[in-house]
Image: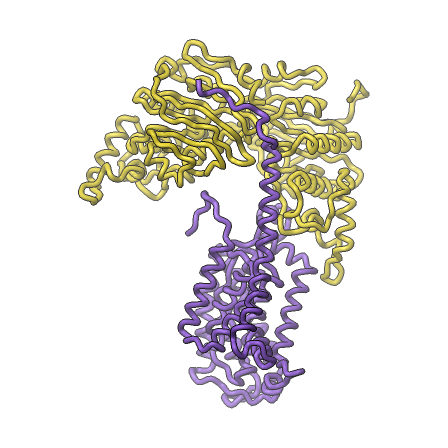
Amino acid sequence: MANSASLPGRGDLTIAEEFAQKIADERRHNQLMQMVPGIILASFAVLASLFVGGFFTVTNAINILNQISIPLILATGITNVIIIGGIDLSIEGVMGFCASIVTLLVLNKKNSMDLGVLGMALTVAAGTFIGFVTGVLHVKMRIPSFMVSFGMGSVITGFGIMSYGGKPATVEYALFPAISQGSILGIPYLSFMALGIFLVGCFIQKYTAFARAIYAIGDNEGVLRSTGVNVDWVKIKAFAWCACCASLAGLFGAIRLNRGEVIIGQGNLFTTITALVVGGASLAGGKGGMLESLVGVVIVVIIQNCMILLGINPYIQEAVKGVIIILAVALSVTRGKKDFVK
Amino acid sequence: MSQSEPEKPVLFSAERLSRYYGDFGALREVDLTVKEGEIVGLIGENGAGKSTLLKMIAGVEQPTAGQMFMQGRPYSCRTPLDANVQGVGMVFQEQALIRNLTVAQNIFLGREDHFRRHGVISWQRMNAAAARALAAIGMGSIPPEKKIWDLNFASRQMVEIAKVFDIVSTANPGESSLILLDEPTSVLNEAECQLLFQETRRLRDEGHAIIFVSHRLNEVLALTDRIYVFKDGTGAGEVKTQEADAQILYRMMVGHATTGQYYKTERQNLREPEVALRVRDISLKGIFREVTFDLHQGEVLGLCGVEGSGNEAVCSVICGDASPSSGTLEVAGTTFTSFANPAEALRYGILSIPKERREEGVIGILSIAENMIMSNLKAACSAGVLSNRRVSQIAREWVGKLRIKCGQVSDRIMRLSGGNAQKVVFARAMISKARILVLNHPTRGVDVGSKEEIYTLIRDMTNLGVAVIILGDTLDEYIGLSSRLLVMKDGQAIRSFDCPPDAKPEQVEIIKYMM
């Protein structure tokens, strides 16, 4: 009969060894995938230097540093939210809201406020509080983070417009132009500050229990819960920190423009999330980090910069960004037969 | 090994411990004692209650009756953390490690406070502490700063043990701990197993107690001091390991054979010559290898094996849920290396009835009728348009045939009991005209009456020529239902048994090959 059992011990490996090998393969694949964004960045930089006129110049380098600052600040905050497997769609709204209210709190042409640095601090505090609320709604009412943050973004954009009643305020506070126009070695202060915020993010990632908990939630939340960590609180903190960074980005935007407008954030959400995914973060959570986010931001900004230098139609630029994010996700997702995608 | 020493003090005991899910008793009135400096083995078939017992000791689940004692004091725990504080730690079969953190970060996950100064964690101190925790179980060679990703599977297992042991011993310095090991060897090779045993013995010699669960009898015999045998959710006795051997344990594990009438063996088909499915040398890397069999029309083929033996994975390959790394499947005259998806398998007449019926088997928000017709909507269509009248008509017909107890066929299926919902799934299989059914634990969680009806249904279908591959709940069920049994162990099909109605094999004969 054909139902004779297969001979044991055929082949060189036992099943257990095969299993161990599978884990090893997975490991190698992972290590390789981690290197890919770095390789892409290097090759883009080389290709752009060779083929894009005006790319490899000091002015353009400063330009790129300038363009990097806001996406980098936003990425610093949202990285943690992405690692836990969530998303925050309200960062544009928070940015716009904060840019709007800060111009009304410092010396301006619209009202009699003159709180100076305190006004800036209050703005960041208000922005952070929005993130706190988003986080609380997400974990306590169990609303998916994309939905909560989508709604919050809309609410907060509305508040932003209402704050200046349709006519944006122009700032007369002397510190604003002093910051936006100041530079060291031709590199604007704002770029240094963005780098500073990024370094704070790196510090948090490297030296705090909070960051360990963030990775644990992304990989296997149950394990963390069973060790007695307050998982909800960690999540709330992640959203608050994300909004804190978004308010700083809004503040920077207002400083640059010298004016507060709610639309100041527009386009940044998409750029930031594209950058994270390109850098190797997984939208399913568990993967990513500050360094990965930095690499991603630089890649995306370089692409944008090249398209501008090449004079490509802005509408096509948008489409290209869309293609990049889809490609990046498609290449990085590990697919299994039993996984469902909704 | 241990000679007869003066009686050691009892560390943990359980009295008349029970766990019921509704009417179903997963564990009934179990007694257990574990002494300090003792390794106790738990053995039994799948679903005999070992895991349920461990989960209750570890605080994952709560007993519905009975008491537990730790060092003479009443013991109860709401969470695993709660258990840890009281000196009990469990190493789970699925590793509870965060792969993108380091070994040290995993060991001290949630306990970073000791290493924090002004909000900053000192990795140096944490790594040093992790090295000590690893050394405490003899694993000083694992580097604490490496990420879990970068470790092989065996080392991950040791990290897991180090973590649990450290949590428990830190919470109870100087006291004996109880460590629960659930199938820790299932993916380890021989050398790694020996290492694990060596360290387990060392923990015992230091006065700690270990409960060891394994499907491998030789390991249980080699490692433990005493063995508890479980059967159908209750204790079937205990033996000193010195006085036990495999034969004795086999006898204790198997239950009384139920009469053939219960399984309707009188309606069991004689083997028909036509082959419905030819499986040739299929392998799934790291899970099972070179499995070969013929499935004849009208027969029930039982694929038996302990958890992790690969029998479930073989089924998922056959019904298109997984792609084998090599080998072929031949059905209806066509040879495949794999099915693209379950839909393709169904096109060739193979339908799987999944284990988690509530989650995977039925669509709760649809009606009974819609659930029945789902796999063969064409049967109720005319010119591409679905006729609701026809759907109800077909559904009513099957409700009658299968004696499904329900109000209207347009009622939501969620309203049905487990047994009746299962019958709806069977009706769907019949309507879909599947020629090969893969039944994944078809009677799990249904009451005795419904069980018998499901057995009748299986006979009904096989009498119509449908071939059935079954993953059963108990060995008794496997033997009673099957016309042939294929025993799998460690990813290989090692033996096949013919089970004609008049000469069914003994359970002991089969369990020998499983464990």
Q: Is residue B229 visible?
A: yes
* Picture coordinates of residue B117, whole percent (x, y): 76, 60
**Does residue A112 sit above or below A224 in this rendering?**
below
In the rendered structure, the answer to whether residue A317 lies left or right of residue B136 reads left
**Does residue B502 sit above or below B63 in this rendering?**
above
| Residue drawn at 46 percent across, 38 percent down | B323
Instruction: Name the foreground residue: B364 vs B405.
Output: B364
- The chain assigned the colour yellow in the figure is B
| Residue drawn at 46 percent across, 68 percent down | A153
Instruction: Name the foreground residue: B473 vs B196.
Output: B196
Q: Which of the 4 image quadrants contains residue B335?
A: top left
| Residue drawn at 21 percent across, 34 percent down | B393
From the image, which quarter does the N terminus of chain B lie in?
Answer: top right
Instruction: Name the foreground residue: A281 vs A247.
Output: A281
Instruction: Name the foreground residue: B194 vs A221.
Output: B194
Q: Which of the 4 image quadrants contains residue A183?
A: bottom right
| Residue drawn at 49 percent across, 78 percent down | A309
Q: Is residue B71 visible?
A: no
* Picture coordinates of residue A115, whole percent (x, y): 60, 84
In the rendered structure, the answer to whether residue A254 lies left or right of residue B368 reads right
* Picture coordinates of residue B418, whole percent (x, y): 40, 32
Shade of chain A as shown in the rendered figure: purple
Q: Which of the 4 image quadrants contains residue B11?
A: top right
**Does residue B134 sit above or below A172 in this rendering?**
above
For this orientation, the residue located farthest to the top is B502
From the image, which quarter does the C terminus of chain B lie in?
Answer: top right
